[in-house]
Amino acid sequence: MMKTCKWLMAVGAIALSIPTMAHGNDGLEITYLSPDNTMVRITGEESTLLLPTQDNVEDATINVIVDNQLVKTIRCRLAQQKVDLTVPMDLTPYKGKKVVLSVVTPQGRSGIREARTDVCWRDMKLTNDFVWKNTEAKYRPAYHHAPQWGWMNDPNGMFYKDGKWHLAYQWNPYGAKWQNLSWGHSVSSDLVNWEHMPVAIEPDGLGMIFSGSAAIDTANTVGYGPGAVVALYTSADRNQIQSLAGSNDDGLTYQKYDGNPVLANDSEARDPNMFWNEKTGKWTILLAHALEHEMLIFSSPDLKEWTLESSFGKGLGEQGGVWECPDLFEVPVAGTNKTKWVLLCNINPGGPFGGSATQYFVGDFDGKTFKADTNAKGEVETKWMDYGKDHYATVSFSGTEADRRVVIGWMSNWEYANEVPTLQYRSANTLPREVGLFKGADGQLYVSSAPAREMLKLRGENVVSADKFSVSSTAAEYQIPESTEGLMEIVATIDAAKNSKVNFTLANSKGEKVDMTYDAATRTMNMDRTQAGLSDFSDRFPAVTVAPTRENKGKVEVRIFVDRTSVELFGNNGQFVMTNLVFPTEPYTQLSVSGTGKATVSGLKVYAIQTNK
Ligand code: FRU
């Protein structure tokens, strides 16, 4: 609606015409100052401003000015031709104050007339009734954690307290691509159903809020009070520095330490991960020295003063890309009464199938130094936690029982995460997994990651069951009822003689399919998603991923979890795992099982997934 229209004309001899048009949607006064700068004065009293965004345009910079003070700056792809996603900006903290947005829009516009045709000005609105609705029905996961809207990457600051799992995550509340990194926050009492909470930590003068960790400070060593939740994260602006915050309401809100940063040592050091070390009576903190391909290990009495104890990793494991998101914890070794330490090291790129992936080291930690185990040749081998393409930034929950370690990974890959064909949100997390250690057929210790025991709760109606059968080149075909919407858990036991192969294919009526094959000759399992559905958004997406099964008997039990955009295959209780995204244009409703050589499949069952949603 046009409210006022001013023309400033002819200054001196120069005919200068500046069409400073002011107009407004109810409660907004929009003034176009120049082709790349528009001012929005908020005169309405409503609680929320709706910002229309478009996925494929450049960011605008929105300076939020309250009572003449700049309170925050966000980057937002304000819609130019069409609206892909409308995001809410909470105005309640500024109630009763004078709010002005100074919006710097992308350059290259011929003049104000062109800039003011952007649809964002028409659709920017105030409301008191923002209610989230799922507008991504086809590709929103039904039982994996995902943000309601906006971009998500790494899981952060995860802790378990008083029967609740708290999952923070790298979140952009103002768009579906990486930007404005804040800590989003979700809570669950069963690791399956997640309640979405308000943003937990927002960017500040020190920068965006990158990844980090949280723990319960039982003895009040940090000063937020006994039992407070304390968090370390990276403040990222031109450089990366480390900051501290504490929460007295279980991670709902955090108070940042006023002496931040607590550490400023290198431009590319990030993702602090800490735990209270009973043996040393101090905090142990790991920090990824990203470009140096090492993890720095610090000790601290209070998370404010850090002492560098050692560094781990130079020349070890996969050295490509950057090292990010460390974690270090003690794990019982299956079948023994011993424990070993596991150091997680996420790297990007350099993963086994391109892009990002999680490697780990098994070894010993004396409170100061981590020493990785070696193989028979005295070498430290590269070990991967998951042999799919979409498993990254994996870290664990603090606060669980000593013998229980639950991890979650970000279910995407930096090669294409910003391009996947969803618009309301981008990226989900993997199913929560329980970490163990087992001895592989080669005598070495490996990490297993099995679906967390709570995932059994997902099992709904048993829609397919088959008695033991021998596989052959003529596939056994099973129809999955459409009522499952393609959401299922497939369970089966393979018993394969040397040189045989067993194949599971999931398909839809359009011929889109995911092939999974166990090869007894090579003791591997592979997953082929080259024809799984949409893939034209990135030439790095089509892939065949391969996992060593680490057994030598040809006996493999599989559990395959299928959600709307993912397939996670767990073998032998997590002794090998493959996580891959898929974008079928309609759900998979056919399962066929075939093979060559002498092999049987027994206990084949398909369960529909039961969710609260
Ligand atoms: C890993 C990562 C972290 C960083 C965060 C920024 O995916 O690059 O190292 O803290 O993402 O969003």
Image (cartoon, rainbow, N blue to C red):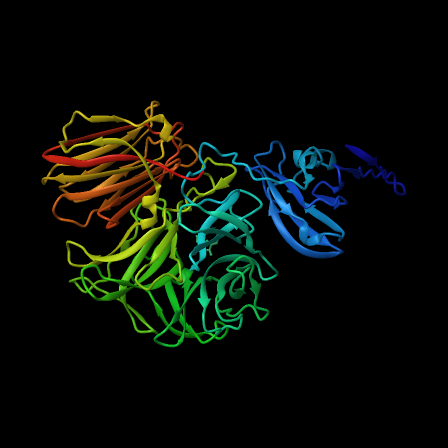
Q: Quadrant of the N terminus?
A: top right
Labels in figure, total: 0
Question: In the picture, which quadrant includes the C terminus?
Answer: top left
In this rendering, would 271 be left or right of 44? left
**Is residue 506 rendered to the left or right of residue 235?**
left
Residue 600 lies in quadrant: top left
> Is residue 209 positioned above or below 500 on the image?
below
Rendered position, 379 above or below 591: below
User: Where's residue 404, x and y in %?
Assistant: 32, 59
Quick one: 324 or 147, which is closer to the camera? 147
Please tell me which residue is depicted at 25% across the width and 62% down the height of the picture. 332
Q: Nearer the viewer, residue 347 or 406?
A: 406
545 relative to 142 in the view: left or right: left
Q: Residue 363 in the image: x percent, y percent?
A: 26, 65
Q: Is residue 107 at least partly visible in the picture?
A: no
Taking the spot 77% from the left edge, 45% from the top edge, the residue there is 43
Where residue 460 appears, x then y in whole percent?
33, 37
Q: Quadrant of residue 341?
A: bottom left
Give the x, y percent position of residue 163. Answer: 42, 57
Using the image, determine if residue 173 lies above or below residue 345. Answer: above
Q: Is residue 221 visible?
A: yes
Residue sitting at the far top: 509
Q: Left or right? Give the position of 63 relative to 529.
A: right
